[in-house]
Every structure is written in structure tokens, then in C-alpha cells.
Image: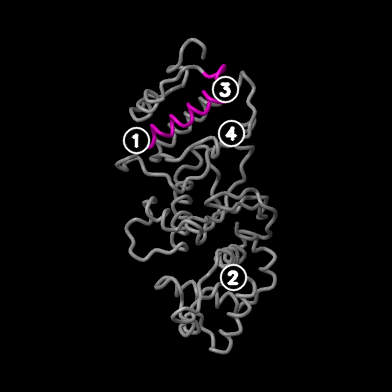
Amino acid sequence: MVGNVAETMAELEPEDFYLLSGVEQGMRFSEWVNVEKIPGYAGLSEENAEYRIDRCADRDLIRRKTIQYEGYQLTFMGYDALALHTFAERETVTGMGSSLGVGKESDVYEVETYRPMALKFHREGYTNFREVNKERDYTSDNNHVSWQYTARKAAEREYGALEDLYPQVSVPRPIDHNRHAIVMEKLPGPELANAKLRSEQVVGVLDLILREMDLAYRAGYVHADISEYNVAVSDDGIVIFDWPQSVERDHENADELLARDVDNIVSYFARKYPSETPDVDADAVADAIVGGEFESVRAFAGSEA
């Protein structure tokens, strides 16, 4: 788990951000930035750079290695600080609050803008960079790839999808994006996995989810990783979130991934609400979405629906 950088931000001076930006620039070319190159990247004198290196290292914003040569790289907290600093300069974020959720590939915090929003820091590659690098389309064509690049590309992919989908599809409204971070609308309710639906709600909520998946497909996207953990449920409906792994409709595996998404959701409802969930042919639903013929899950269920 990466720490909350908010408390550290108040201690940082403008030259500290020059140092962090310089290390970030150097990481475009090598995993560890040679200490001799940092003053040039950061636009600081050697003496000032040395002082800033110590300040940022003490605050866990950069880390050091001494094998072969003395080199530095950003930690995720350092990368967080740069993104948060940019949001503050843009006046996108005026204050940072408590954690809203910590996952394998992201940390989410409540932030203040003109009203409470969510700030999502992507963490792809933080602990399993090489595995993520192999699996994700946005890193597969690059020879030099760092966790920094992997997380930034994931955020770019997700923000682009949200911009394309909102508001015609029920996804979080995107507000701003920088580096590996996204500011977006807060989720309206708990994850589907933590929601307790009443019997009379089950088929209706399943239908809502499949309708939104259909709308997303019409808008050119397949989520590609949908489950009970990235659908939020409230009295106003559902919101589908976490889109960094999404693929466009013309992707060679889009229809296969759509079929998997549909099966994931239908199977979840069948497991958690076996009495209320009718027997649904998930493959037929996916085919109907692809063919532009999906209207309701009730058309694919028995008389129980």
C-alpha cells in the first residue's frame, strides 16, 4: 500500500518539485537516474540538487540505489506529489480527504473541488510491473517501459474511455487527468458485491447492468474486466467504473471479451441470488449486443423473469 501524500505536500517547496520533475524526466530514459544528471534535468545547481535529493528521500518521494552507480527513481508517493501539485495549480483539487478504497491497481481518495469528488491514483506495475506489462495493450509495443509509464498509460486509457462514454453510458463523470491520476465523480453507492438487493430488485438491476454494457458497446467500448467489484449500485441506478483495461469495439478480441463480461455478471447473479435470477443464456445476450438487438434480459429468460 502506498501512503497518502497529502500531509507531505504542505512541507514541500517549489524547488522540491523541480527535483521530482527532473527525476521524472530522467526516468524516461533509464529505470534509475544517475545522480550526476539530475541537476541538469531539474534545472538546479549541484548543491541545491543534493539538498533537494536529501529532502525528497527523507519523505519517501524518491528512492536510491548505489550498485554500479548512485541513482534515483520516483516512488509512487513522489509521482502522486507531482500529479497532486498539477491539480492544485489548475485549481482542480483544493483539498484532499480520506481514503475511499485501496485496490491491487489503484488507490482512491476523496478530494475537494467545487464539491466532493474522487481522486484515483493508478498503481499498475507497482508490485507486479512485468506481469502487467505483458498483459496490457498499452504497454506491449514499447521496449523501455517503467511502472511510471505503465500507470500513466492506464490512467490515459481510462480517462479517454470515460470522456467518450459519459454521459450516454452510466460511468463516473471525468473531471481532470494528469500523469497516473484521474479526478472524477464519486460513486453513488456501494459495489454490487457489497449491496444487498431485495428480491424484487434482482432482475431489474441485472437488466440495468446489461443495458449499460449494450450502450457502451454502441458507443464503441467493451469494459473487458467487468465484475461485481466495479459496478456501483444506488437508488438512482447503477454506475460501471474501472475502465483502464477496456478495449474499443473494433479490437480483435472485443466480442470475446464482451461475452466474458456478460457471463461474469450473469454468473454472479445466479450465484448470489439463485432463487430470483432466471436461467439466462449469457452467450445469446452477448450475441444480441453485438448484433444491435439487445432490449432486455427478460427476452433471454424463462417465465420466472
The residue pinned by badge 3 equals 273
Name the residue: 39% across, 73% down. 29
Q: Earlier in the sequence, mark 1 or mark 4?
A: 4
142 on left or right of 26: left
> Between marks 3 and 1, how big is the CA–CA gap?
26 Å
Tell which residue pokes out farthest to the left in this image.
252
The residue carrying mark 1 is 256
Q: Tell me the amino acid under the disc marked 3.
A: Tyr
**Residue 241 point in image, percent of width and height:** 53, 42
Q: CA distance from mark 4 to mark 3?
A: 12 Å
Disc 1 is placed on an element classified as: helix
Q: Which of marks 3 and 4 precedes in the sequence?
A: 4
Q: Which residues are magenta?
A: 255-277
Q: Quadrant of residue 234?
A: top right
- Please give left or right for residue 98 compared with residue 290 in the image: right
**Residue position marked by numbered label 4 in the rendering:** 192
**Residue 8 within the segment the image draws in magenta:** no
* SS label for mark 2: loop
Q: Main secondary structure of the magenta part?
A: helix
Q: Which residue is mark 2?
A: 61
